[in-house]
């Protein structure tokens, strides 16, 4: 359009070019040409709403119209405030009956050409609206140049300045709809495209992307990097990494493995372990899946901050430095690597199945860890998920996702855990051979394409030679979890009748079919002997197990032995008594985990009193010698402590006696377990949490000062800070002095955040009010460092025992929740809902939260779920405290 205007201007007489008539003619020409070739221009980019989301309806419409997409992208990263880009997008269009939206978020546009016509862009800061009159049926090409500021947040092309040496590092995070923050793109997972990238960057930088580097042209100050065309990728799986990263490299056949980190932390990284873990994972996945790694390189990049622990882009995986130590987490490494197959080789059509790719990655990582004989056994327990799935707030894995903004809140850790549990159950149902063959079919059939849940189930059905659609409908499309209980009678020491009874909640009434193992145990002097294990498939309300007639009468029956099924267990009366008194006599660690989880769930349902559960802990926990069993048990005891601290005044006597007993037991076991360092360490952490008496707090102070010692214990910085935070939280004598001493002793960045946690935990109203107001003023555009601080302090602002301080701002928190929800990210609101929704273990609190939920229908999904979970936590607290003796 600009060319047409220029031509019109040149045809005017010289005097008229500067006259008022000239301006009128020019204005008329602009309006006429705009009407013909484009719609009227909209507000400038900086006035548009910051709403980078893609709706499911929009995604379906575009996917039906567009195909054969190619992006050519040239980026100039030489400026430290913004980057410049030139993009050419080629695509085929089925029809030109309606406008087409090209996504580009909050950029400054310099030039736009559509099919060789240079135009003034119709751009609202979110989309370029391409007029149908400018588009062809068939081949089209859109070219534009633009500039965009670097992101200092969690999405787009992120720039991080190293506080140590001032070096500048760039890395992209493009999930779920933020590829448009880096480039013009059709930003949805089911529009895969070929990307061809070139980059201009400072000459001392390294640049990496999804495709292999093809050529470098070095200059004095700047270098140019050229990359080969990528395989077809979804926009959110594309990536760009650039900066003066330190690099380690290890080649494996035709595959190049690299590890990248900031120069200032390079000396802290255990490179050999990182690369060895990656080699291990590659070998296992190739063997398990029968499909080779899909790219020719794999880069792992440690970056300062991410909204998640990791992001697995095609051929590049970013890891948040805060999520790892110098020695990496094997589980995290393997989970991220698995996404190269399940997220990048095959990408789900839309975000409603995003949980599937994530859960498959976790499941394969669990298998890889179990298969490694050099790795300590990790009991891949899923039993704690059942407790969550019994609540009204949990939704089925397969659920509608109306727009990309719902992705992060929709796929939370509980949902992923449930996905892993259900896929594990499916694995048991069809067997390892069929399951692995089905994965291979799925990956090969949809190689570098898109798929959905039905495609995955179809591949598994083909391999298993049995229809699985009904199974998928029951388990993946419906929420809730069933319960099973063994019901049996014995005569003359032998089983005369054995029945598996299945029940469901009123809200989720479906009775399902699945395969489980029954474990039958008999009590001996020193152990519970496993007499018999029987695999059986149950369905409906009752399933009689006739083959068990005549078997020796058991003292304990666990009807989901080895966790084959996804089901809650309700222990029969005889088994419950045996478990409470003799749980430590069970030889198998995984079964001990599941029994403790079963008992704790019975407490939260009001079927077992808390004092009986704690009585069983005092009997059995001192004998526990497996860290993988003790760790979740201590987590349950910390939950019990929080509940005890919320008890009503007339139950305070029992609460104080119970917490005193927990304190004494944890100290005694810390002192007596020096021969088992891991166990001793866990009990010491528990003692720090349970040290509530004056004597115990004095003891912690003496340990910090070095005037007392515990045999076998070396106080690491982490343990010292745990003590400092605890003493400040409970206002111990001299706690603030100890905090100042520890700040002088440890001045690391991590220590500064821990010191902040200790300060916030102090029961000082004015101090809490200052931080509370910062939290209430926060919005998504704030600096990422402030967000990190707020996420750190939220768990410490109103701990369970500081009820009066919490109540001082409770009404304000509820009144401002809706506005806070509108202007903050899902990550912020998840923490806020978990730690700052007021709870006081009372019916009044339940009513207050319920009114909030009913009066604010526009709350985001993450906050709706958070309020529901707060209501459920209050109801559980009330249920637990009612039967306790005063």
Image (cartoon, helix red, strand yellow):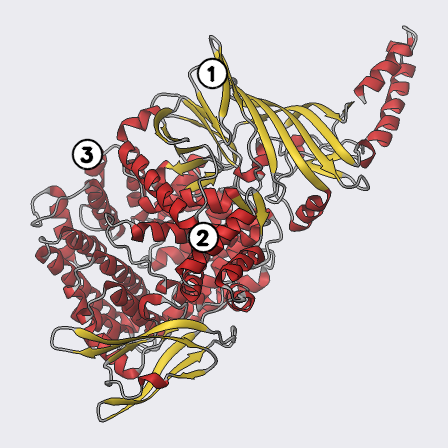
Residue receiving disc 1: 202
Residue 614 seen in this snapshot:
yes
The percent position of residue 274, horizontal first and vertical second, equals 31, 36
Alpha carbon distance from label 1 to label 3: 39 Å
Extreme-bottom residue of the structure: 492
User: Which of the 4 image quadrants contains residue 736?
Assistant: top left
Name the N-terminal-most of marks 1 and 2: 1
- How many residues crowd mark 3 within 10 Å: few (<14), some (14–19), many (20+)? few
Quadrant including the C terminus:
bottom left
Q: Residue sitting at 21 percent across and 52 percent down?
A: 685
Q: Is residue 348 visible?
A: no
Q: Residue at x 41, y 31 (%)?
A: 254
Q: Nearer the viewer, mark 1 or mark 3?
A: 1
- Left or right, 675 with respect to 814, comes to left
- Asked where in the image residue 86 lies, by quadrant, the reply is top right
Residue in front for this viewpoint, 18 or 97? 97
Nearer to us of marks 3 and 2 is: 2
Disc 1 residue crowd, few under 14, some 14–19, many 20+, Cα 10 Å: many
- Work out which quarter of the rendered image holds the N terminus and state it: top right
Q: Which residue is mark 3?
A: 745
Q: Which of pointers 1 and 3 lies earlier in the amino acid sequence?
A: 1
Q: Is residue 90 left or right of residue 742?
A: right
SS class, disc 3: helix
Q: Which residue is mark 2?
A: 360
The residue closer to the viewer here, 205 or 692, is 205
Q: 789 or 497, which is in the foreground? A: 497
Task: Give the percent coordinates (x, y) of residue 56.
Answer: 65, 50
Q: What is the spatial separation of the Cα atoms under label 1 and label 2, in whole angstroms?
A: 39 Å
Nearest-to-viewer mark from 1 and 2: 2
Q: Secondary structure at mark 2?
A: helix
Q: Residues within 10 Å of mark 2 (few under 14, many from 20)?
A: many
């Amino acid at each position: 359009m600009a060319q047409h205007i220029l031509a019109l201007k040149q045809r005017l007489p010289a005097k008229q070019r500067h006259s008022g008539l000239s301006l009128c003619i020019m204005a008329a020409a602009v309006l006429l040409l705009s009407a013909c070739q484009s719609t009227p221009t909209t507000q400038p980019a900086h006035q548009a709403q910051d709403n980078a989301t893609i709706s499911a309806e929009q995604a379906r419409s575009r996917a039906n119209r567009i195909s054969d997409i190619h992006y050519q992208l040239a980026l100039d990263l030489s400026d430290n405030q913004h980057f410049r880009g030139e993009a050419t997008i080629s695509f085929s269009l089925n029809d030109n009956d309606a406008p087409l939206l090209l996504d580009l978020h909050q950029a400054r546009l310099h030039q736009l050409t559509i099919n060789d016509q240079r135009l003034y862009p119709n751009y609202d800061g979110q989309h370029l609206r391409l007029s149908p009159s400018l588009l062809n049926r068939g081949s089209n090409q859109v070219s534009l140049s633009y500039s965009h500021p670097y992101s200092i947040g969690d999405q787009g092309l992120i720039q991080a300045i190293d506080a140590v040496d001032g070096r500048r590092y760039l890395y992209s995070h493009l999930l779920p709809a933020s590829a448009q923050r880096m480039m013009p793109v059709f930003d949805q997972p089911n529009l895969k495209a070929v990307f061809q990238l070139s980059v201009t960057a400072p000459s001392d930088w390294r640049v990496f992307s999804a495709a292999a580097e093809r050529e470098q042209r070095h200059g004095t100050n700047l270098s140019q990097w050229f990359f080969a065309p990528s395989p077809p990728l979804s926009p959110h799986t594309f990536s760009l990494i650039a900066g003066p990263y330190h690099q380690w490299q290890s080649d494996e056949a035709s595959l190049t493995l690299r590890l990248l980190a900031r120069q200032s932390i390079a000396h802290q990284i255990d490179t050999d372990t990182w690369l060895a873990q990656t080699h291990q994972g590659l070998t296992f996945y190739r063997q398990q899946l029968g499909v080779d790694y899909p790219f020719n390189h794999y880069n792992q990049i440690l970056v300062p901050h991410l909204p998640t622990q990791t992001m697995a882009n095609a051929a590049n995986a970013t890891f948040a430095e805060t999520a790892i130590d110098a020695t990496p987490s094997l589980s995290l490494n393997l989970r991220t690597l698995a996404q190269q197959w399940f997220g990048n080789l095959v990408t789900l059509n839309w975000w409603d199945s995003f949980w599937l790719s994530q859960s498959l990655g976790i499941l394969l990582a669990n298998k890889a860890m179990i298969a490694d004989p050099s790795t300590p056994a990790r009991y891949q327990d899923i039993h704690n998920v059942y407790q969550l799935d019994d609540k009204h707030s949990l939704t089925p894995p397969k659920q509608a996702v109306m727009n990309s903004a719902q992705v992060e809140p929709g796929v939370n850790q509980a949902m992923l855990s449930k996905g892993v549990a259900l896929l594990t159950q499916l694995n048991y149902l069809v067997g390892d051979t069929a399951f692995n063959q089905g994965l291979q079919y799925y990956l090969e059939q949809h190689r570098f394409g898109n798929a959905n849940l039905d495609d995955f189930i179809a591949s598994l059905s083909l391999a298993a030679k049995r229809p699985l659609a009904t199974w998928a409908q029951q388990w993946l499309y419906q929420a809730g979890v069933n319960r099973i209980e063994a019901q049996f009678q014995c005569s003359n020491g032998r089983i005369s009748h054995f029945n598996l009874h299945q029940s469901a909640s009123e809200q989720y009434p479906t009775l399902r079919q699945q395969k489980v193992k029954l474990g039958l145990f008999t009590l001996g002097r020193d152990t519970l002997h496993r007499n018999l294990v029987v695999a059986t498939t149950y369905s409906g309300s009752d399933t009689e197990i006739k083959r068990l007639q005549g078997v020796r009468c058991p003292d304990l029956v666990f009807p989901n032995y080895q966790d084959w099924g996804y089901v809650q267990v309700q222990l029969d009366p005889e088994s419950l008594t045996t478990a409470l008194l003799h749980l430590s006599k069970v030889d198998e660690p995984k079964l001990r985990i599941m029994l403790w989880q079963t008992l704790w769930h019975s407490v939260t349902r009001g079927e077992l009193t808390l004092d009986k559960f704690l009585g069983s802990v005092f009997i059995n926990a001192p004998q526990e010698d497996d860290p993988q069993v003790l760790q979740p048990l201590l987590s349950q005891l910390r939950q019990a402590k929080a509940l005890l601290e919320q008890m009503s005044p007339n139950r305070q006597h029992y609460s104080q006696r119970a917490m005193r007993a927990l304190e004494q037991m944890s100290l005694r076991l810390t002192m007596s377990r020096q021969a088992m360092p891991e166990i001793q360490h866990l009990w010491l952490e528990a003692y720090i949490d349970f040290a509530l008496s004056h004597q115990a707090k004095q003891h912690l102070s003496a340990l910090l000062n070095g005037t007392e010692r515990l045999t076998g214990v070396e106080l690491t910085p982490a343990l010292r800070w745990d003590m400092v935070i605890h003493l400040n939280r409970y206002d111990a004598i001299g706690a603030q002095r100890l905090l100042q001493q520890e700040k002088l002793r440890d001045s690391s960045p991590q220590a500064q955040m821990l010191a902040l946690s200790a300060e916030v935990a102090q029961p000082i109203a004015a101090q809490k009010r200052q931080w509370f107001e910062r939290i209430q003023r926060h919005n998504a555009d704030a600096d990422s460092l402030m967000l990190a601080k707020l996420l750190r302090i939220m768990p410490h602002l109103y701990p369970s025992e500081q009820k009066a301080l919490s109540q001082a701002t409770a009404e304000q928190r509820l009144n401002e929740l809706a506005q806070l929800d509108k202007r903050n990210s899902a990550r912020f609101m998840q923490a806020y809902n978990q730690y700052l929704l007021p709870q006081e273990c009372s019916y009044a609190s339940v009513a207050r939260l319920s009114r909030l939920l009913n009066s604010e229908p526009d709350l985001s999904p993450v906050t709706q779920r958070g309020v529901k979970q707060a209501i459920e936590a209050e109801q559980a607290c009330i249920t637990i405290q009612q039967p306790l003796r005063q």
